[in-house]
Amino acid sequence: MNVIDRVRNANRLTKVRWLIVYCTDLILIFPFFGYFAFFLLLQAGMGWPPIALGAVALTVFVVLSPRPFRIAVRGGPRPTVILAVTGVITIGLVLGFAQFWTVPTWLALMTPFVRRRTLFILVGASLVAVPGWAWLLDDYSVLPALLVLGVFTLISVGAVWANLWLWRLTQEAYEGQEAMARLAVSEERLRFARDLHDLLGQSLTDVAHRTEHAQRTLLTDKEAAAAEMFEVRDLARRSLREVRTVVQNYRAVDLDEVLASVRAVLEAADVRCTVRADTASLSPEARTLLATVVREGATNVLKHSKAERCTITIEDGVLEMSNDGVTGPVGEHAPNGLAGLAQRLRAAGGTLEAEPDQSGRYLLRAAVPA
């Protein structure tokens, strides 16, 4: 799988994680100033062996720096070795070359893994020690060094802190959406179970009592027992009709709600969706059938294609749903998917076809009696 397919097939949470991580990598800009500082030292007459050693150490720092934040985002353990190695490199660059360009980045690396009080102590110590050492070593002005170090530290630590906070909020929102979806399904199941219990509980109880009464009277009064069983039969048929009515109501799907829901789901998956539907003249049966087809078509777009655009049109009882995400050959439809829907539409006097059209788009076309 290439990079483009990986990005396209990733869910929204993963894309947000990538965005936050790569934005945080921008704090690595500050250590790169160290290479320019080494160039200036070389121009000033410092020998190349210590400069080469410092450049290698700085390169190791830059290579290791992206790892801690990625580990923090994934919820992994503190990378003690990486933090220790980068810390030693930072101290060495400060003591040996009076370079503080890696200090803000190292403090940012520590941010996800230490307490807030510890981080404040580290920041305060660096703002005092680093400018003072630079002044003692190279006669730098303390105020400019303190200002530059303070600004870079504020940007680096603040960026990591803000991105971690944003990532936690994103995770909570994503988990909340999943929990709400599961809760909605559970509530619907409970409501369906409650309706069936209210509907069948009393009916089945009456059937049991009447059957027991007919059994007791069968030996003494066969005509009364037969009449009782006729009433049991009528009660059973009435209960069956009521159950069918309830199930039919659950099967009925609102077409307009399904269209709005499908559009929202597709656009959340980065599929641009256009809907043009004239549903006012459709019968309830036709609306239910087309809603089922739209829902199945959207499922296929999400699971079996790499679509970027999807168009849904409904006019005079004809649904056309096309997308640009099918590039290879199309196999047979699953019996519980489009093939099952095709049989259901044929039984209702309609048709269903699904195949690539002349323009290369995959077209799902369903026609029902309006």
Image (cartoon, rainbow, N blue to C red):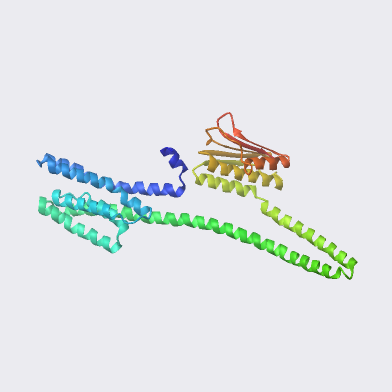
Q: Position of residue 292 (x, y in %)?
A: 64, 46
Please name whichever residue, 342 or 286, is drawn nearer the observer in this view of the structure: 342
Q: Quadrant of the C terminus?
A: top right
The residue sitting at the top extreme is 358
Most extreme residue toward the front, as rendered? 219
Foreground: 207 or 57? 207
Q: Is residue 151 visible?
A: no
Q: Residue at x 44, y 50 (%)?
A: 13
Q: Residue at x 31, y 58 (%)?
A: 113
Task: Point out residue 157 in the picture as x, y percentages from the top left corner.
Answer: 29, 54
Task: Find residue 8 and report its horizontal and vertical position in percent.
Answer: 46, 41
Q: Is residue 243 left or right of residue 158?
A: right
Quarter of the image for the N terminus: give it.
Answer: top left
Please report the residue visible at 65 percent of the width from the left and 50 percent of the height from the top: 254
Position of residue 138 relative to residue 226, above or below, is above
Residue 339: x and y in percent read 65, 40
- The front one of 240 and 290 is 240
Describe residue 248's horizontal placement relative to residue 6 as left or right.
right
Q: Dividing the picture into quarters, in which one does residue 165 lie? A: bottom left
Residue 47 in view: yes
Specify whether 256 is left or right of 94. Answer: right
Q: Residue 367 occupies which quadrant of the picture?
A: top right
Residue 9, compared with residue 193, is above or below; it is above
Q: How many marks?
A: 0
